Image (spheres, rainbow, N blue to C red):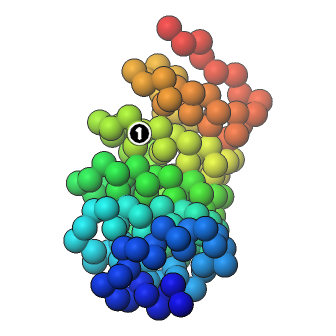
Amino acid sequence: ALVDRLATDDRAHVIRPLSAFKSAARPAVPRLIEIVEKEPSSDVRWNAIRTLGKIGADSKPAIPTLIRALSDSEPLVREHAAEALGDIGPGAAVAVPDLILVMDDANARVRRDAVRSLGQIGPGAKAALVKIENRLNDEDEAVREAAKAAIRRIDPTRTTKKEP
């Protein structure tokens, strides 16, 4: 019933509750993708993106849409797109080059979630390790902490540079 309501003007009220169903909300993925691509409201878009992430690996068809959302003008949309790619997990490895670029975002929360998501992708994100190591010196503490954790997840044998 909630999936059907995504096609109505009531969609903003059902997107977040859908996230509680995790992978059981898989039938909502096509409609959520459509919302992300066509919805003018950034609040509705980022909530749809967040829900795609909570659905997890079953949201893999949304990866191209999430990659495009990394360039959205709204920081909350970019932040949740980065987060959702990590929630999809190793299957989102195709997004590694785009997440590497987002690590330079002006918004610290976007940088943090890009770094965190690269860690969640795991060994498939090895190409990002040097750039993640650069984030060990980020001005934002949450980004630095995300970088430490991401390095451990991508390559547990790698030693990290000392912070200044």
Residue lying farthest to the right in this orientation: 157
Residue 140, position in %: x, y?
Answer: 42, 24
Which residue is depicted at the point 57% across and 54% down?
86
Mark 1 surroundings within 10 Å by alpha-carbon count, few (fewer than 14), some (14 through 19), many (20 or more): many
**Along the line of sight, the residue nearer the viewer: 93 or 8:** 8
Q: Position of residue 112 (x, y in %)?
A: 47, 38
- What residue do we see at 62% from left, 43% from top? 119
Residue 69 is at least partly visible in this image: no
Q: Give the residue type at disc 1.
A: Arg
Who is closer to the viewer here, 70 or 36? 36
Place of residue 37 in the rendered image (x, y in percent of width and height, measured from the top left): 32, 75
Nearest the viewer among 31 and 85 is: 31
> Where 120 falls versus 141 (above or below)?
below
Quarter of the image for residue 90 reads bottom right
Which residue carries the number 1 mark?
109
- Whether residue 74 sits left or right of residue 112 in the image: it is left
Give the residue displayed 52% in from the left and 26% down from the top. Answer: 144
Q: Position of residue 164 (x, y in %)?
A: 50, 8
Residue 118 visible from this viewpoint: yes
Using the image, determine if residue 116 lies above or below residue 27. above
In the rendered image, the vertical position of residue 100 relative to residue 44, given as above or below: above
| SS assignment at label 1 | helix
Residue ID at (71%, 28%): 158
